[in-house]
Image: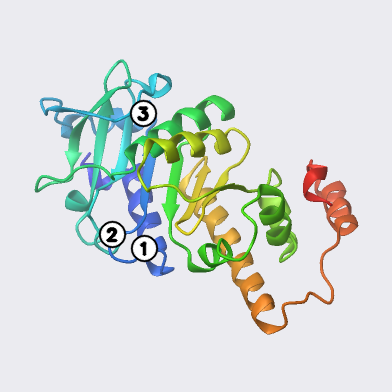
Amino acid sequence: MSVTESKAVKGFITMANDGWEQGWHERNGGNLSYRMKDEEVKEIANELDHSTEWHPIGASVPGVAGEYFIFTGTGRYFQNVIKNPEESIGIIKLDDKGENYQIVWGLTGGGRPTSEIPSHLMSHETKKAVSGGTHRVIYHAHPANTIALTFVLPLKDEIFTREIWEMMPECSVVFPEGIGVAEWMVPGSHELAVRTGELLKTYNVAIWAHHGMLCSGEDFDSTFGLMHTVEKAATILVKVMSMTGIKRQTITSDNMRALAKDFKLSLDEKFLY
């Protein structure tokens, strides 16, 4: 099977294009990665080149050592993933220590994985551990309304979660664990990677102040849907704040508790102040 005919790569391409169509990926903004299953690697094994050189990751991720990942490329545009996947994305393999990677397919023309590869791989390592291996997708994008809120809301998990939850009843159902928020840090830095890893031990959504959002999920649909839900709620909140600055009525804490009971959810009381 050719790489671009595999279900995993097709799903990756579709998700990248969906993000582009939402307007979340100006120029070369944002990045996406997927931790491949063994059977997905086996079905395209004949198409992979393991003679390529090794490059340092910039972090140590022994928890995902030896694994294969699909990555978007640094400097490459999401709008071109569907048009020219072999140039825009690539498959990498990590060494047995989780300290180096090699490109075994794609990223033609001297391409490399996203410059935020340390954040992605450290996030994958964290979510693999806390999810029992079920989480495989890490997605970072620049949804405008979520970013706008980081300029006006306090950068606190409790406040962001509560404000977003209030906008749509679906929110506490889709991400009952809440939202984590990181203060501004240099994009692609080790500091940001470490901070994101800390947040992902608890949350599936990490908001990077004045920068964007990172989501983790089990598959492409659920991860994209998670970001889509947060950004939709953020859009409503921006409209509400722009209209009056005052919420005359809202979804209350008791409303959320009733929702949690009916949907058999566990909502942390710290968000129900």
Which residue is rendered at x = 61% and y = 41% of the image? 203
Residue 21 or residue 30, whichever sits in front = 30
Q: Which residue is mark 3?
A: 39
Q: Is residue 265 visible?
A: no
First in residue order: circle 3 vs circle 2: 2
For residue 55, above or below residue 208: above
Which residue is rendered at x = 51% and y = 55% of the image? 209
Q: Which mark is residue 230?
A: none
Residue 126 point in image, percent of width and height: 50, 29
Q: Which residue is mark 1?
A: 25
Alpha carbons under labels 3 and 2: distance apart: 31 Å
User: How many residues crowd mark 1 within 10 Å: few (<14), some (14–19), many (20+)?
Assistant: many
Residue 143 left/right relative to 181? left
Q: Quadrant of the N terminus?
A: top left
Alpha carbons under labels 1 and 3: distance apart: 31 Å
Which residue is rendered at x = 37% and y = 48% of the image? 187
Residue type beneath disc 1? His
Q: Secondary structure at mark 1?
A: loop
Residue 220 or residue 25, whichever sits in front = 25
Q: Residue furthest top?
A: 96
Q: Secondary structure at mark 3?
A: helix
Q: Which mark is residue 28?
A: 2
Residue 61 or residue 129, whichever sits in front = 61
CB under 8 Å between discs 1 and 2 = yes
